[in-house]
Image: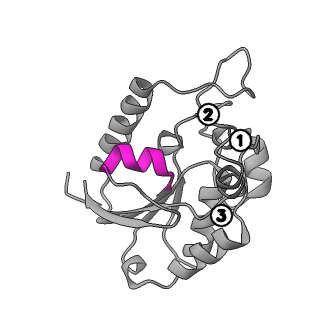
Amino acid sequence: MRKSTVHLVRHGQSEFNAAFDSIVRRDPMIFDPNLTALGRAQASALAGDSRWDGVELIVVSPLTRAIQTAQHIFAGHRAPWHVEPLQREKCEHSGDIGRAPRLLAADFPQLAFGHLDDPWWYCDPKRPDAVAVEPEPVLQARVAAFARWLAARDEATIAVVGHGTFLNRLTGIAFKNCDVATREF
């Protein structure tokens, strides 16, 4: 195993982020939200950055806002993509509830979703569309598993597009929308 340089990116502003911040931090019940116009602009502003030149693998969460962010940043980039559910957001709100792999595949046909469970997000198996808050120990186990997954990779440079709470638990950094941090694994 060799060390990999990993660029960690939080997704751009989503419809959930915009509504949550504007309604006194109550859940606006927006499931698997899209990026806002601001979120698309934030992601597009990162495109063409020279740090992406050596990226050999793009790892993205299965949540739509992360995929859309990566699409804006890495449009035309030749590195392979991998959709990795380990680095999905901590389930706390409606925006952290995903969609079935077949629905994601219909919206993003260039990506592979066949390896995802259905559901692939944290949920109550009896009510998979309800918001079930993921316990912190479950999140910490996922963070540790993802760190091991990254450490086992052969690529020298990897880009990861994910979520604020997950990336915070991985790095200790508070990420704003489209913040980037670089670490070695």
Gap in angstroms between the C-alphas marked 2 and 3: 18 Å
The range drawn in magenta is 162-172
Circle 2 residue:
120
Label 2 element class: loop
Is 5 contained in the magenta span?
A: no
Tell me which residue sits at (64%, 37%) in the image: 93
Label 3 element class: helix
Q: Is the Cβ of the residue at disc 1 closer than 8 Å to that at disc 3?
A: no
The reply, left or right, for residue 124 in relation to residue 168 is: right
Q: Is the Cβ of the residue at disc 1 closer than 8 Å to that at disc 2?
A: yes
Tell me which residue sits at (51%, 78%) in the image: 46
Out of 124 and 150, give the one closest to the viewer. 124
Toward the front, the furthest residue is 24
Circle 3 residue:
68
Out of 89 and 71, give the one closest to the viewer. 89
Gap in angstroms between the C-alphas marked 1 and 2: 8 Å
